[in-house]
Amino acid sequence: MSAELVITLAERGIITILMVAGPLLILALGVGLLVSIFQATTQIQEQTLAFIPKIVAVLVGVVFFGPWMLTQLTQFAISILQNLNQYVG
């Protein structure tokens, strides 16, 4: 296995991880920002207030993006397994 092949495989893995985790992270970031703005305007300084909306948003995101995320991960795994003879030996 050459160094170029290892770097290409690592690059594809990182891109797949970012694509799969990205929508959920963006949802959590957006909801966290909205809750922070709400806390700043109402002067409610409860630290645990942000957790529940973020958890709900991420769960809704998993329900909505879950099939697409699973497809992306499955395609990556299939491509690795189909080209396994290139990686071994």
Image: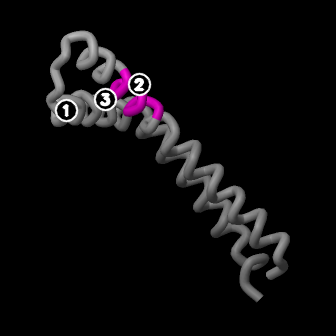
Measured in 3D between alpha carbons, the distance from the residue under mark 3 to the one under mark 1, in whole angstroms, is 9 Å
Q: Earlier in the sequence, mark 3 or mark 2?
A: 2
Left or right of 89? Residue 48 is: left
Left or right of 59? Residue 30 is: right
What residue does disc 2 label? 30
SS of the residue at dot 1?
A: helix
Q: Position of residue 52 (x, y in %)?
A: 19, 32
Given the image, on which type of amino acid does mark 3 rest? Ala
The reply to whether the C-beta atoms of the residues labelled 3 and 1 are less than 8 Å apart is no
Tell me which residue sits at (58%, 61%) in the image: 77
The reply to whether the C-beta atoms of the residues labelled 3 and 2 are less than 8 Å apart is yes
Q: Is residue 59 above or below residue 30?
A: below
SS of the residue at dot 3?
A: helix
The quadrant of the picture occupied by the N terminus is: bottom right
Q: Is residue 71 above or below residue 40?
A: below
Given the image, on which type of amino acid does mark 2 rest? Gly
Q: Which mark is residue 57?
A: 3
What residue does disc 1 label? 52
